[in-house]
Every structure is written in structure tokens, then in C-alpha cells.
Image (tube, rainbow, N blue to C red):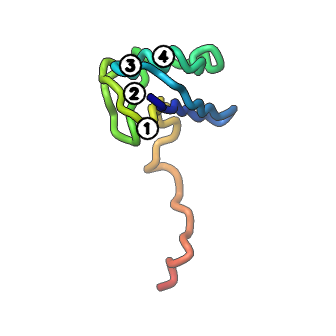
Amino acid sequence: MQISVAYAEPAGQFWQKLDVPDGTTLREAIERSGVLAKFPDIDLEKQKVGVFGKVTPLSAVLHEGDRVEIYRGITVDPRTVPRRSGANDDE
């Protein structure tokens, strides 16, 4: 079945399509993708992972077309960053 693995950080992005056997877990897909070699700072024991934006356990079995995502922690407190002005702010 076809799935993809995605990861992004300021230094670079990773997106890899993979053909994996039925029954493949998130952890197995991440390990097969090569993302851990490209970004050795990824720590699957600490970082959250998910499918299509929903946090999911590493042991979850994937389905055809799933997009596996590895999430980074927030590096800036959003309460301390000024909001950007939107195009519709004057309305």
C-alpha cells in the first residue's frame, strides 16, 4: 500500500512516498522512510507523531494513502509573539 512520511524543520523538509506491506505501523514506516538518518535529532520517544494532523500512537497500523507526520515541539511561546496583521483586520 502507498503511504507518505513528512517532517519539517527550519533547516529542511522531508516528504517521502513509500510502498509498505499491509499491517505496517507508524514506527515501521518512519524507520523505513530514511527520515531518521536525515534528521538524527528526531526522538520518537519524545516527539509526537500522527496521521493527517491527528496525534496517533507509534503502534497504530497504517491504511492506504495515510500521511505520517512527525511533529516538533513549539519553540516560541505563542503568547509572547505579536499577532500578524491579517488582510481583513480593517473590517
Circle 1/circle 3 CB separation < 8 Å: no
Badge 3 marks a residue whose secondary structure is loop
Please tell me whether residue 51 is drawn above or below residue 32 in the rendered image: below
**As drawn, is 39 to the left or to the right of 62?**
right
Q: Position of residue 66 (x, y in %)?
A: 41, 36
Please tell me whether residue 2 is drawn above or below residue 91 in the rendered image: above
- Name the residue: 54% across, 33% down: 6
Single out the mark in the foreground, 3 or 4.
Answer: 3
Quadrant in which the N terminus appears: top left
Residue that mark 2 sits on: 48
For marks 2 and 3, the one nearer the N-term is 3
Amino acid tagged 1: Gly
Amino acid tagged 2: Lys
Q: Nearer the viewer, residue 88 or 61?
A: 61
For marks 1 and 3, the one nearer the N-term is 3
For marks 2 and 4, the one nearer the N-term is 4
For marks 3 and 4, the one nearer the N-term is 3
User: What is the C-alpha distance between the residues marked 1 and 3?
Assistant: 12 Å
Q: Residue 63 falls in which quadrant of the image? A: top left
User: What is the C-alpha distance between the residues marked 3 and 4?
Assistant: 20 Å
User: What is the C-alpha distance between the residues marked 2 and 4?
Assistant: 9 Å
User: What is the C-alpha distance between the residues marked 2 and 3?
Assistant: 18 Å
Please tell me whether residue 23 is drawn above or below residue 77 in the rendered image: above
Q: Position of residue 77 (x, y in %)?
A: 46, 42
User: What is the C-alpha distance between the residues marked 1 and 4?
Assistant: 25 Å
Tag shown at residue 65: 1
Q: Nearer the viewer, residue 62 or 76?
A: 62
- Name the residue: 43% across, 38% down: 65
Residue that mark 4 sits on: 43
For marks 1 and 4, the one nearer the N-term is 4
Residue that mark 3 sits on: 24
User: What is the C-alpha distance between the residues marked 2 and 1?
Assistant: 20 Å
